[in-house]
Image (cartoon, grey):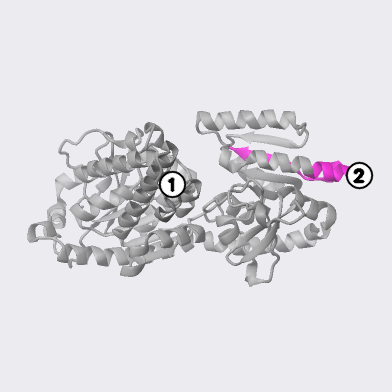
Amino acid sequence: MASCQPSFYTNFVNNKLKVQEDDRKNEGNTFVNEMKRRDVEDPSRKLLYGFFHPYANNGGGGERVLWEAVKATLLEDDRNIVVVYISSDQEPLQIIRKAEEKFQINLDSPRVVFIYLRRFSKFIDGNYWKHFTMIGQLLGTFLLTLEAMNELSPDVWIDTMGLPCSYFPVHVILKIPILAYIHYPIIQKEMFNKLKYKSIRQVKFTKDPADILQVGKLMYWSGLYYFYTYLGSLVDVVLTNGTWTYSHISEIFTVNTLTGSTIDTLYPPCGEGLTSTKGLDTVRENKMLYIGQFRPEKRHNLILEEYLDFLAQAKSKKLAIAKLPTIVFLGSCRTPDDTATLSALYKQVEELELTAYVEFVVDCSYDEVVHWLSKATYGLNAMWNEHFGIGVVEYLSSGIIPLVHASAGPYLDIVTPWNDEPSKSWYNNTGFFFKSKQDPDFDPIIQVEDENMLNFKAGDSIIAYPTFAKLLSEIFIEHPQLVAPPVLESMRSNGEKVVEKFSNRAFDIKWMQYLKTLSSLESRYRDEKRSTVERVY
């Protein structure tokens, strides 16, 4: 904390005592004087912000939030030092370089200290635990947190990966402020819908082994749910990535609401012109681009099945097939499971005889992504309850018209009407929506005769949405005026205005506001919750 280059004091090589060269020189006694800044109210006392993110080198959406938060923390005050707890094998400068290139951000790297966690990191991987996965991951998080604290104890604990069992040892042992940025609740009430007994009131005690097992599952999930509620109560500032996550976390972290702890929404930073296609002189083609990893939950197969129905409708009306939009699947394969999903999609395209209508772009470069975003006219997203959906933000920022599933982030936060203009249930002045019978919340009891318009409950109301095939039929066959060139141009303009709230700048401003809250809490906790020795050291 006294060093002119805090990053030197990493444990990447070993934990042996070492002193940076300029610190050793101690010119003007600066190094020794800085070490004496221990008074709680000293305005120049350095603060260690510990970012608990073992997978910090992965390069995904969660890591985008992490590194933008790191950048904003360093910019907020010169006395701030960032500690990143990581389980990577790469050396610090390689990690910094990857983050800067991947997310187009500049980091004050001398003030970023990497603490490598090598003993317990495997225990937070869900694949490590064959049974009772969630309990295993919670235990792994607890052990990994103890390892992190043993290596270096920070002044503020920040969880940007969603590892709630870290809150307990930090709260009890370190007594420091905790901030949690939550992308997705690890458990939610909807999970109980899969059980035979959804609450203890429904339990009927019988000797049937199957019923006993169901009671056991209810107790297991209930225990996890209330333990998650308790862990959340230990957090001082809870930030969620969108409306869907906020509503669920507010329902789960009920104690926080009662005690007045902060629960707020902070949209993830999606870049300043990250995928901007302005200045690219390309003519948009009649293509529907789907950016997303090749994973089952992205439901590429649903898009193919519905698209086949749409083609059948177009052919029955003897429309020119060449004028209909085709599909481009653009994504990456990170695991063997992803590769298997991609292989299944290739096979499905052949079986449905859609080879002429579907293209695959796999593991492409950033420049290729930008190229496709400048080339396509429409953007797809079929995932049910995607908590945010940065790909949809990229559509809007690049002038692509979104055709997305009407749920969670894309529906509630991203493809929203500009200027609060009145809109239909399945489209507004920025994009279009659809639903599916495959949705977990689909209820066949409330359906009507029209199989292509699906009814869904929204509170006390029932709202009708088209299937994806019906949506395509509406805008390309029945009512093509909905996608006439002037309309599309207006929608593009609206979309560019909507995405301003997802900019890096908007994220930085709000993040820095909460840093001031954490800094104030750190001084108060240090003064009130610690003994004389702990207050200083």
Q: Position of residue 535 (x, y in %)?
A: 13, 60
Quadrant occupied by the C terminus: bottom left
Name the mark nearer the viewer: 1 or 2: 2
User: Of all residues shown, which one is farthest toward the front?
Assistant: 207
Q: Position of residue 527 (x, y in %)?
A: 15, 65
Q: Is the Cβ of the residue at disc 1 closer than 8 Å to that at disc 2?
A: no
Q: Nearer the viewer, residue 322 or 275?
A: 322
- Identify the image quadrant of residue 7: top left
Q: Position of residue 108 (x, y in %)?
A: 35, 51
* Label 1 secondary element: helix
Q: Position of residue 119 (x, y in %)?
A: 26, 34
The circle on residue 173 is none
- Residue 366 appears left or right of 483: left
For label 1, the residue is 63
Reading the chain from its start, which is encountered first: label 1 or label 2? 1
Query: Which residue: 63% across, 47% down?
Result: 382
Report how far apart the C-alphas of labels 1 and 2 lie in the structure: 49 Å
The circle on residue 318 is 2
Q: Residues within 10 Å of mark 1 (few under 14, many from 20)?
A: many
Query: Which residue: 73% across, 36% down?
Result: 358
Q: Is 292 colored magenta in this rendering?
A: no
Q: Amino acid at mark 2?
A: Lys
The region drawn magenta spans: 310-331
Residue 62 appearing in the image: yes
Q: Is 313 colored magenta in this rendering?
A: yes
- Name above or below for residue 305 compared with residue 266: above
- Residue 119 appears left or right of 354: left
Q: Nearer the viewer, residue 26 or 273?
A: 273
